[in-house]
Amino acid sequence: MQLDVIIPTYNRQELLQRTLQSLRVAKVPIGLTVRVTVVDNNSSDDTRAVVERWKANFSDSLSYVFEPKQGRSHALNAGIDSTDGDLLGFIDDDEEIEETWYETVHSAFSNPDVDFIGGPYLPRWEINPPAWLPPDYCGVIGDMNAGDLITPYGEDFPGMLMGGNAVLRRAIVHRVGKYLTTVGRSGNKLLAGEDDDMYRRLLEVNAKGVYHPNLKIFHYIPAQRLTKRYFRRWCFWRGVSLGVLDRNKPKDVAYLFGVPRYLFGQAARGALRNLVARLKSTNNSAELFAGELAVWDIMGFFYGKHLYRVDRALDA
């Protein structure tokens, strides 16, 4: 069993070294061969030099790939094209794997029916999280935990396969295709739809996926992301991403003005809670901010569905 771990990176040489250290020290079980590929997405820092220095610690199992097209999806696809292992692991450059991560991968894929797996994101905070952070929006900053039970992915799963902690069989990637490049993060646009699109395609072909609570990664959350402005921008651009995806693959739900009606309900309830709170001079809270973010969700979706030019994303 051969696992290729792909790390897309852009100007994070310090964090990248922590990622590489965690990959180097994690225990590799008998029967699993691991190779690591860092895909430099046109960085302007010393990323390449960092990878070259670290090669000596990996016994020729660390590779460097340069991808000039800006965007996480382009980097992921370059990593897929430059490797040939039967398993593809995806880790972001601000993460560290738990020491049993490889063992969990080997155990899960010993079942030939499993096509993909994912696991929890455990936050490594730079500062204490603010009181206004809504629990339902922790995914904005990559804080995700679906519990302590092995659970199949599907329509009833409370979430999706997030691409910063995912392992897929190469065969299933060949079947559903690589990552969509028009809705991935690029430049200042916080587009975040490539993982949604991949997850939907996996479910459409009835691929068997499993959430493994032991497939843990530790995700660094910088102070600069713990601002309301960042949350608002992320929710808007996430909505744009989902709106763009919905153009070609509408959901089997009721729509109003091209937007799922349930989004209007969420936004209306959120706006009403904020209005009542202002009239009563209630202090802001996580619940109230969640209501505001629901409005940003729907505004982004509407813009992405009707106004956003996809061809701009390709050149971003």
Image (cartoon, rainbow, N blue to C red):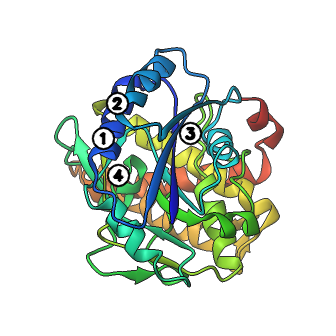
Residue 229: x and y, percent?
Answer: 41, 35
Q: Which residue is mark 1?
A: 220
Please tell me the numbered disc located at residue 289. 4
Q: Which residue is mark 2?
A: 17
Residue 290, numbered circle: none
Q: Which dot marks residue 190?
A: 3
**Amino acid at pointer 3:** Leu
Q: Are marks 2 and 4 in contact (CB under 8 Å)?
A: no
Counting residues from the N terminus, which is met first, the one under dot 2 or under dot 4?
2
- Crowding near pointer 3: few (<14 within 10 Å), some, many (20+)? many
Q: Residue at left 21%, top 44%? A: 129
Task: Kindly state the secondary structure of the residue where label 2 is placed.
Answer: helix
Up-down relation of residue 257 to residue 313 (above or below): below
Q: Secondary structure at mark 4?
A: helix
* Mark-to-mark CA distance, 3 and 1: 18 Å
Q: Nearer the viewer, residue 152 or 312?
A: 152
Could you tell me if the residues under marks 4 and 1 are in contact, i.e. CB atoms within 8 Å?
Answer: no
From mark 2 to mark 4, how far is it between C-alphas?
A: 35 Å
Q: Residue at x 72, y 45 (%)?
A: 181
Q: Is residue 159 visible?
A: yes
From the top left corner, tell me how far across and down residue 296 is, in percent: 52, 49
As measured in the structure, the alpha-carbon distance from the residue carrying label 1 to the one carrying label 2 is: 13 Å
First reached walking from the N terminus: tag 3 or tag 2? 2
Q: Quick one: 85 or 232, which is closer to the camera? A: 85
Q: Residues within 10 Å of mark 4 (few under 14, many from 20)?
A: many
Is any part of residue 279 visible from this angle? no
Please give left or right for residue 20 compared with residue 190 in the image: left
**Kind of residue at badge 4:** Phe
What amino acid is labelled 1 in the image?
A: Tyr
